[in-house]
């Protein structure tokens, strides 16, 4: 049995092609999803689930959203607390009928 030597450049090109295909497939899946802003329920929701819902919508960690929201509240940009309360009544929960 004779094996040919592996060409590092060809392996690198193959890896990149695989990554490109996987990335394209993920983009297509993301576009197919019916992405709507919803409030989360359960352990992700600390108060009304607004930050958890925003984290899912923007594909970020909920901790990042909570930190940004806390900084905006302490800095006083706009009225974050009022906006949060309005969002709590406007944005439907995850389990709500579509």
Image (cartoon, rainbow, N blue to C red):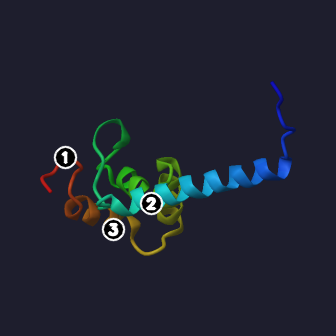
Residue ID for mark 3? 83
Mark closer to the chain start, 1 or 3 = 3
- In the shown orientation, is residue 21 left or right of residue 56? right
Q: Residue furthest top?
A: 1
Q: Is there a contact, CB below 8 Å, between mark 2 and mark 1?
A: no
Q: Callout 2: few (<14), some (14-19), or many (20+) C-alpha neighbours within 10 Å? A: few
Q: Residue at x 85, y 47 (%)?
A: 8
Q: Is there a contact, CB below 8 Å, between mark 1 and mark 3?
A: no
Circle 3 SS class: helix
Residue ID for mark 1? 95
- Quadrant for the C terminus, please: bottom left
Mark closer to the chain start, 2 or 1 = 2
Q: Callout 3: few (<14), some (14-19), or many (20+) C-alpha neighbours within 10 Å? A: few
Which x, y percent locates residue 52? 38, 50
- In the shown orientation, is residue 83 left or right of residue 61? left
Question: Label 2 vs label 3: CA separation?
Answer: 18 Å
Question: Label 2 vs label 1: CA separation?
Answer: 19 Å
Circle 2 SS class: helix
Q: Residue at x 28, y 42 (%)?
A: 41
Above or below, comparing residue 77 to residue 10 in the picture: below
Q: Residue at x 26, y 66 (%)?
A: 86
Residue ID for mark 2? 58
- Quadrant for the N terminus, please: top right
Above or below, comparing residue 84 to residue 55 in the picture: below
Q: Residue at x 29, y 37 (%)?
A: 42
């Amino acid at each position: 049995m004779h094996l040919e030597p592996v060409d590092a450049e060809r392996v690198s090109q193959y890896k990149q092609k695989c990554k490109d295909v996987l990335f394209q497939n993920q983009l297509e899946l993301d576009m197919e999803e019916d992405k709507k802003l919803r409030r989360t329920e359960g352990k992700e929701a600390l108060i009304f689930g607004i930050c958890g819902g925003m984290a899912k919508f923007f594909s970020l960690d909920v901790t990042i959203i909570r930190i940004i929201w806390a900084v905006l509240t302490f800095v006083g940009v706009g009225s974050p607390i009022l906006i949060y309360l309005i969002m709590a009544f406007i944005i439907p929960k995850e389990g709500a009928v579509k």
